[in-house]
Amino acid sequence: ENDEENDRSGSAKAQAEKAKAEGGEGGDEEKAEEEEADVHFEPVVHLTEKVETKTNEEAEEQMFKMRAKLFKFDRESREWKERGTGDVRLLKHKENGKTRLVMRRDKTLKVCANHYVVPDMKLSPNVGSDRSWVWNAAADVSEGEPEAQTLAIRFANSENANLFKEAFIKAQQENEALFAEEE
């Protein structure tokens, strides 16, 4: 019995419960802790107003959408770097009719690809995979300033990759006439 009194193992709460069960001291302390723990704070600012986020995609119609993973080729390190995973979309502007490729990362919705689908882009199969494509974008503006980038996109399966290719080529053909009118 003397060993039990010198036992220092267990939490203070467990020891207080043990003391309470034995009918000894510690019951009053636990009641005081419970009273202190029931604290309620009112928020300083109530968030009731819903903010509408502008994406600059409101004047565009979605022609294609599919989940994919995007990569860009880093010329300095000579390797592929992942740009993000999300929905790749082909958006056609309702007024000028031009189609662009836009891809946003999941969760953060940060843009990882944003460029017009121009006729001189050559969509070629990625070596060693039937579910990915590679192309050169002359002016991708996903990081602010327009810059030339080599991009690769990978889909879940080859059927999805082929659906993307068909939509991409169709957008190129539609844009070809529109860009020719400007010149």
Image: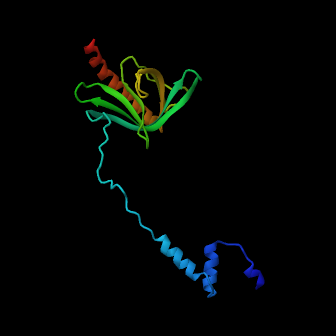
Residue appearing at x 45%, y 37% in the figure:
68
Which residue occupies the foreground of this view, 167 or 88? 88
Residue appearing at x 30%, y 46% in the figure:
51
Question: Please, which residue is most extreme toward the top here?
Answer: 183
Residue appearing at x 75%, y 78% in the figure:
6
Question: Please, which residue is most extreme toward the right here?
Answer: 2
Looking at the picture, how far across and down is residue 33, in whole percent?
Answer: 53, 74
Residue 12, compared with residue 19, is above or below; it is above
Residue 75, compared with residue 8, is above or below; it is above
Left or right of 15 on screen, residue 87: left
Looking at the picture, how far across and down is residue 146, in whole percent?
Answer: 41, 21
Question: Please, which residue is most extreme toward the bottom here?
Answer: 23
Write down the quadrant of residue 121 in the picture: top left
Looking at the picture, how far across and down is residue 148, in whole percent?
Answer: 45, 19
Which residue occupies the foreground of this view, 72 or 7? 7
Q: Quadrant of the C terminus?
A: top left
Which residue occupies the foreground of this view, 49 or 156? 49
Residue appearing at x 31%, y 26% in the figure:
99
Residue 79, compared with residue 45, is above or below; it is above
Write down the quadrant of residue 165 in the picture: top left
Which residue occupies the foreground of this view, 110 or 43? 43
